[in-house]
Image: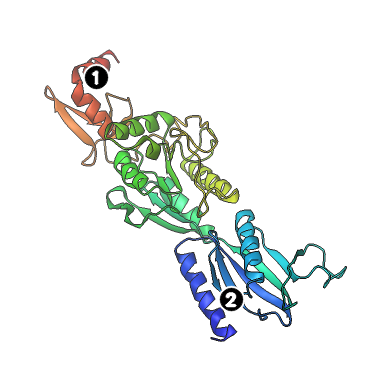
Amino acid sequence: MSAAAEGWDVIELAGELSRRGEEFAMATVVWRQGPSSGHQGSRAIITATGQLHGWIGGACAEPVVIREAQRVIAERKPTLVLLGTSDQFGSSVPSGMAVVPISCQSEGAMQVYIEPVLPAPHLTIVGRSPMAHTLADLARALGWRTDINDGPDFSAANLNARSIVVVATQGHGDEEAIEQAVAARPVYLGLVGSRKRGTAVLGYLAERGVASEQLDLVHVPAGLDLGKTSHTEIAVSILAELVQLRSVGQLGASGRTASAAGMGASGTRPSRKGAPGADQPAAEADQSEAVDPVCGMTVAVGAASRSLEHEGTTYYLCSAGCRAAFESSPASYVRKETRC
């Protein structure tokens, strides 16, 4: 196979890896001094695990290129490497070029450019609120692959360990969406809502038997803490957190964000209670509202709300967790509501 044909095969593989969301490094021979077995224009792909695809040179060059490529992937910085014996170059090496002396019987030399290839992140947003659509628009402006799903339409079938998921259902099926998403163990899973709301959701899922190590992956609240903000600013704060985590390598192919017991990567996340879009479900203008007797949250009265009757009165609950709590001890919550 010719070097040109090998090069096209490498380009096709690069496209496939990018579509799968995998990080890798591309190595290209930009100069050679015979009798090196590498040729100018030869290309190879090196994965984060050290697998090499393509041709970059013989047994002397390959281990060095693989090692340097893995460093490039980790540091996310390209490098230009000069391979040869230490006495071949003298003082003629340009500043900033990495020189790696190798002892090969061929006595050849090569200059290899190694660059990291970071595929566009894949963001999945679950929810239909204005904040969810704003977040999708902002992410697409950065070139991120972005899907937005209404809660009932969401499926975790297309998620994997490199997926980024933001659940912004805001009271409309939070538990169901988190339960589906967490099973895929995405690199990031955030819930839009206050810390109190997050505690209720995660507590309900824990009672359903979802493993604690899975629930520990959930960031609540999603996004950087900007205080009381609008739905547009909440979207900005979430994307800012994702960009920050990606810039330090925590959203890479092998990186996983740290999230302690539903906390974000920073470890502390003050609640955004009262912020537009944080706790409150999006209510249609022609719908009336009711107060959840368990948590005190305002919920829209409609077909999608979790309602039940008790002693002739209809109560509206924000979530499956609150409904289960009310059903287990309705008298205590009815008395609580009466006192209020």
State which quadrant residue 324 falls in.
Answer: top left
Relative horizontal placement of residue 4, taking residue 148 as reference (left or right)? right
| In the depicted structure, whether residue 271 falls above or below residue 334 | below
Quadrant of the drawing holding the C terminus: top left
Residue 151, horizontal then vertical, whole percent: 31, 48
Q: Amino acid at mark 2?
A: Trp
Residue 334, horizontal then vertical, whole percent: 22, 18
Q: Circles 1 and 2: CB distance less than 8 Å? A: no
Residue at (23, 16) in percent of width and height:
332
| Of the image marks 1 and 2, the number of the one nearer the N terminus | 2
Badge nearest the viewer, 1 or 2: 2
Relative horizontal placement of residue 153, taking residue 11 as reference (left or right)? left
Q: Amino acid at mark 1?
A: Tyr
Tell which of 330 and 264 is nearer to you: 264
Pick out the residue farthest to the left.
Answer: 312
Which residue matches tag 1? Answer: 333
Residue at (46, 50) in percent of width and height:
134
Marks 1/2: CA–CA distance: 70 Å
Residue 75, horizontal then vertical, whole percent: 64, 54
Visible in this render: residue 34? yes
Question: Label 2's element?
Answer: loop
Visible in this render: residue 172? no
| In the depicted structure, whether residue 35 falls above or below residue 274 | below
Q: Identify the disc placed on residue 55.
A: 2
State which quadrant residue 273 falls in.
Answer: top left
Residue at (55, 46) in percent of width and height:
245
